[in-house]
Image (cartoon, grey):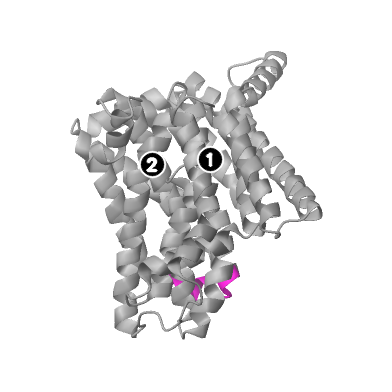
Amino acid sequence: MTIMQATLLLFLVFFGLMFIGVPISVSIGCASIIVLFAGFEPGVLAYVVAQRCFKGIDSFALLALPFFMLAGSIMNKGGIARRLVRLARFFVGKIPGYLAATNVLTNMFFGAISGSSVAAASAVGKIMGPLEKDEGYEDAYSAAVNICSAPTGVIIPPSGPLILYSITAGSVSVSALFMAGYIPGVLLGVCVMAVAIFLAKKKGYTGSTVEEKDSIGKVLIDAIPSIFMMVIVMGGILLGWFTATEAGVVACLYCIVLGFAYRELTIKQLWSLMSDCMMDTAVILFLIAASNIMSYTMSYSGIPAALSSTLMGITDNKYILLLIMNVFLLVLGMFLDLTPAVLIFTPIFLPIATSFGMSPVHFGIMLILNLAIGSVTPPVGSVLFVGCNVGGVSVEKVTKYIVPMFCAMVVALMLVVYIPQLSLLIPKLCGLI
């Protein structure tokens, strides 16, 4: 089988199975095995598939994912998100559309603690939606702001997708990736906030009309324990006190203690959250195992090298190559969830990026930012559907507000892509690269 035939067969079977409703992990595994049948005896193939599955999940660093997922779930139930909302309101209370700006800032705070865009869209949206409705904000506008600002959660560390990219890429430092995510994450949030404020002015949404009963001092003191988790987690990683995986454990323990201290978390709720996290982790691990078969299939068939040669044959200008890659990732990000997309496209595009001198850390931020933007677009945008569900609006109604914010997100992406120092400055200052 030629490389072209292998490529067409792999992706036709993969997308064909997805189209008829087969789960994505099963689609990945089946498509890969069908291609490998051309090169292996059935007995040898069974051994290779089992070996690749085991190797894909045999990683200590992967333990960080369920722990950070659990920490984010506990934050939803433990009263942490509500305190972050109150803190954010004090920073933006006098500007037009202040509740929309509060929503963006809270999602940035939430992302800096939980690392999950879906969790942020759910937790923050449930709190901000009723507040915005009371002040006359259109439901579709409020939902769009929440949806488009939630992806800051997967860029600002700690971030599960950045951990996943580190494992998939091989030898890329998680600490360097975490430090690299701060400026791009904040830039993404600022761009969304700017459009949200512009739209708020057009719609006549004023500054705060609500008098906060508590002083800024009391609100700040109430929120400091929540914010301090970010200091503990990132400070501990940078100072070498614990690894990213151990940081996930620390984050979980801290959130549990905080939830009980706030008297908003019960033993029964904690047990339910742990059970849900276990099920979600099993799904992710099965997906990673299946994706490792696809990575091996692509490597065995020579697909990454062939794609690299094809792109290099089009042009040797790295700026145009970057543009082509970004367009490709943005489009495919509309059809694939973030986790499988990271697992599939890292082994394809990372060698191409490094071949013209791009840092693996910079590429990782670019990749995750691309796919995070894809999570707010139909037809498969997980954040889009969670945000619409929480906001009680249809995708059709929210789209007219998402479009200008999507454009702002793409502007932030292009700045990150073509100005490497936005990603690399902090890791270099910390001596991580």
Name the spot of residue 11 as percent of width and height, x first: 51, 38
Q: Which residue lies most toward the left here?
A: 317
In the picture of the structure, the residue carrying the numbered disc 1 is 160
Nearest the viewer among 20 and 90 is 90
Q: Quadrant of residue 171?
A: top left
Q: Is residue 181 left or right of residue 294?
A: left
Identify the residue at image location x=37%, y=66%: 91
Q: Residue at 54% x, 48% y: name it.
A: 114
Look at the image and tell me in which quarter the C terminus lies: top left
Q: Amino acid at mark 1?
A: Gly
For the residue pair 87 and 14, the one nearer the viewer reads as: 87
**Do tag 2 and tag 1 residues touch (Cβ < 8 Å)?**
no
Point out which mark residue 181 bears: 2
Q: CA distance from mark 2 to mark 1?
A: 12 Å
Asked which secondary structure carries label 2, the reply is loop
Can you say whether 275 is above or below 315 in the image?
below
